[in-house]
Image (cartoon, coloured by chain):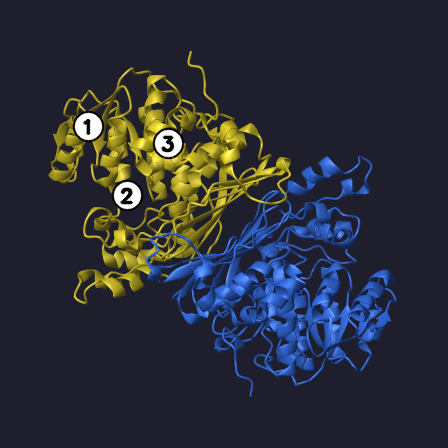
Chain colours: A blue, B yellow
């Protein structure tokens, strides 16, 4: 937890990527040798104390009893999806702000379902909620700094944890998620909704059908101009801008990386091996502030250290390369890139387009429309209309929620497990450390402790007949 | 020169990036410490022996007397442009293949101009051509391994050298170009035609007009499926594929990087500081060969080491970041990217599009058409029709040739000098070294030896009234 860090400690430690190393609260001044030693320990990871959660299925449950921690904009938006997924019962909600928890309760009631219990009692009010014995799964949609402690508390209380992205942003925290999932035998899933986007699942279908050939390279990004949101005096503006004062890193790597990880079978036959990161200068938030805040606004005293562009290159154990990018502080159209290159073709989003060598398309991008009948993912074929009508992020939120519940109801292995949550979130701390070391290459921890080597599925590319 | 390297030496040295370090022909086995020491020396560079060529204008010449070394596909294509530029006299041509030199001669004659002298006498026949005293400028369009020795010989013979891209691909060679230009007071220009592309000059105009704000990030690439060309038994197929057996690096960085360097005033107030590189695996050429060559084709014995994707991240002294990419061995549409991001807007090519915050376009890309009247570059406004009609690479080749001749005729400083040639080519060797060291950050040499700090122009964004 970084909440208790004093500004002085931050200034001393930021240059070493110490938040990523989990050392920001350290009482002693750090030097580069110390941080190298700590990094080595964190790359190796703690000794494994319990069996792996790789391939562990959910226990079947006909009705899934769900609770929410965090009912701000994101929590309520996801709740809007879940009330439309059959066989879900939302039994309890928690927020630090009573008004937000009540709004969440109203969503459930409006859907004609029994009102959930409401827990509102300060920062740790969620712990009362976790004492209930009628909860299967806790959905965590709080500010980033709360994902780890709340997911850990949920698993320790015997609940599966579904956390918003990123799962965590320090290496010790990511290891804690892994260790807790293994010790408690509860899943900790990071709800990476972009993995369920139309384009991402179309690309996954292409990859799994082999039409792109062997996969050699991928790209993903979170390039989204958030300046006005970051300076709002409500919602994300209350906490998200602060992270730009704490870390010079890829603050939000998973939307771009998660889908690419699925194309490349990361933790399912391949793994992230090492990465480098580079940050540009930090101009965007300063310029925006100068143009939009009053002279006496206290936010004029904030010091932003996160570079406008943070670009990462990741190498996988099987020799694939990945480019991941983060930019939320300069004016530009939204772009998650979502590119996957194989030896027989390439897919790229924004807009969705494909080039398949076999079609002899003479090096020209083709609209995906002509391939829709053949390669649209079965989840979108089956429930795309419903998903689009509900509309959360173009429909992918509904597909994600539906699929999570389906996995529990059918006793399947979750599409994404704690190892994915850790690996996809790891470029946060690793990019911070790489940038602090002048773009030095940094090894990924193997959160699976060897379990990455077996081939297995993430999101199924084809519909399974349920036994 | 790498021509004399034995395969055994290559296998021994490739892992250390030794070609980039200029050590591939070394008699002794190299270790990592040796290569670090050599790299340090090459980053610092040799002692300066003559005055800088920064800002040195051409001597005025009303008619520019031009000679060609290399009259293959590229040489003859550029010649097609030059015969249409007023006040150019092509006095001599050279090639190792008589038929190609004769074809070049015919181009000049067909344009109604006096036939040039033809020099055809083996690998070093060009040296006879260089003995002439009626040549102002030599255009070099030979295979990559010849650019450096021929440019050096040309300058030593009192001629300005205009070389095709890349200027060189070892650090010692790039320093030799710089030292020779300074010693001979002759310019060595790398003819980076993409700097004169419609989109590149449009973007440059936007940048210089300030409408993109302060520049924070740029991207460029050479992503062009060359597999069929690389396996041809003529033209580039005769020599270019071989480079994929020699170096695991960004083999062709300048088309993407040159224009971005101009947006960022590289060597004109900013400079490349350091870079990292990552290569993907090498699958494309092998798959293509398996599918297309006969079983007994001797090329089946070739070993390719250049990764399909080589991606670089470059940091500038002023804190800007650049992503540069090279991929010529997998199926995909052509893309040089050509992206420039500022604090007030962004431009990206393929297709040309722009987002200017001031237009309140609600985060949507806009077609450039509506900005054409205001921001199309003056060279394209003035001679775009002529350029497109001649058509070399969409017209940019003519603009480049016209502008080179204009600079000489008006006694101007060239748009691109030997320092640009060296800096833009440097990601070739630097990426090789970085990849060999597991994506370690590598410092750029400062080829200007401090001369980068003064503000000055590259290609002018606005037309100057000639005195």
Q: Which of marks 1 and 2 is nearer the N terminus?
A: 1
Q: Which residue is drawn at 80% across and 34% down?
A: A295
Task: Note whether B429 is above or below B189 in the view shown.
Answer: below
The residue at 60%/61% (across/down) is A254
Would residue B459 be seen by someone viewing this image from the given angle? yes
Q: Can residue B446 be seen in this view?
A: no
Name the residue tied to disc 1. B130
> Which chain contains the residue that carries disc 1?
B
Callout 2 secondary element: helix
Label 2 CA crowd tier, 10 Å (few <14, some 14–19, many 20+): some
User: Which dot, 3 or 2, sits closer to the camera?
Assistant: 2
Q: In this view, does A465 lie above or below A402?
A: below
Query: x%, y% of residue B149?
Result: 25, 37
Give the image quarter of residue A312: bottom right
Pointer 2: what residue?
Answer: B144
x and y, in percent, of residue A103 in the image: 82, 63
Structural distance between the alpha carbons of marks 1 and 2: 19 Å
- Chain under label 2? B
Residue closer to the observer: B99 or A433? B99
Query: What is the number of the mark on residue B418?
Result: 3
Residue B378 pos. (x, y %): 44, 25
């Amino acid at each position: 937890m970084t909440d208790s860090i004093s500004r002085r400690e931050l200034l001393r430690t930021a240059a070493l990527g110490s938040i990523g190393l989990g050392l920001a609260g350290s009482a002693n001044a750090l030097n580069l040798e110390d941080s190298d030693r700590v990094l080595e320990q964190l790359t190796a990871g703690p000794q494994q104390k319990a069996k792996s959660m790789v391939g562990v299925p959910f226990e079947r449950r006909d009705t899934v009893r769900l609770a929410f921690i965090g009912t701000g904009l994101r929590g309520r938006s996801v709740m809007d999806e879940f009330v439309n997924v059959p066989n879900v019962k939302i039994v309890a909600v928690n927020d630090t702000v009573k008004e937000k928890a009540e709004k969440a309760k109203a969503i459930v009631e409006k859907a004609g379902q029994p009102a959930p219990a409401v827990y509102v009692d300060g920062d740790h009010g969620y712990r009362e909620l976790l004492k209930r014995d009628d909860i299967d799964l806790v959905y965590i949609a709080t500010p980033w700094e709360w994902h780890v402690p709340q997911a850990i508390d949920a698993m320790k209380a015997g609940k599966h944890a579904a956390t918003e992205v990123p799962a965590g942003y320090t290496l010790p925290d990511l290891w804690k998620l892994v260790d807790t999932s293994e010790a408690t035998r509860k899943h900790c899933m990071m709800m990476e909704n972009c993995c369920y986007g139309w384009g991402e699942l179309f690309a996954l279908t292409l990859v799994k059908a082999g039409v792109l050939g062997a996969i050699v390279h991928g790209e993903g990004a979170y390039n989204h101009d958030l300046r006005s949101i970051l300076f709002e005096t409500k919602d994300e503006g209350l906490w998200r801008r602060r992270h730009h004062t704490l870390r010079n890193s890829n603050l939000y790597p998973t939307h771009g990386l998660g889908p690419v990880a699925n194309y490349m079978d990361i933790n399912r036959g391949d793994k992230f091996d090492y990465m480098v990161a580079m940050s540009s200068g930090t101009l965007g938030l300063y310029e925006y502030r100068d143009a939009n805040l009053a002279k006496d606004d206290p936010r004029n005293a904030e010091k932003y250290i996160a570079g406008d562009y943070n670009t990462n290159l990741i190498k996988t154990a099987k020799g694939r390369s990945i480019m991941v990018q983060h930019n939320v502080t300069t004016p530009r159209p939204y772009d998650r890139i979502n590119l996957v290159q194989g030896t027989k073709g390439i897919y790229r989003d924004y807009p969705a387009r494909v080039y398949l060598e076999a079609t002899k398309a003479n090096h020209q991008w083709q609209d995906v429309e002509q391939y829709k009948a053949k390669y649209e993912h079965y989840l979108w074929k089956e429930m795309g209309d419903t998903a689009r009508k509900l509309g959360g992020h173009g429909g992918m939120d509904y597909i994600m929620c539906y699929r999570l519940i389906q996995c529990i109801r059918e006793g399947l292995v979750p599409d994404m497990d704690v190892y994915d949550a850790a690996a996809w979130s790891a470029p946060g701390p690793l990019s911070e450390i790489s940038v602090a070391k002048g773009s030095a290459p940094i090894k990924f921890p193997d959160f699976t402790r060897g379990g990455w080597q077996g081939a297995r599925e993430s999101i199924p590319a084809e519909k399974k007949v349920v036994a």
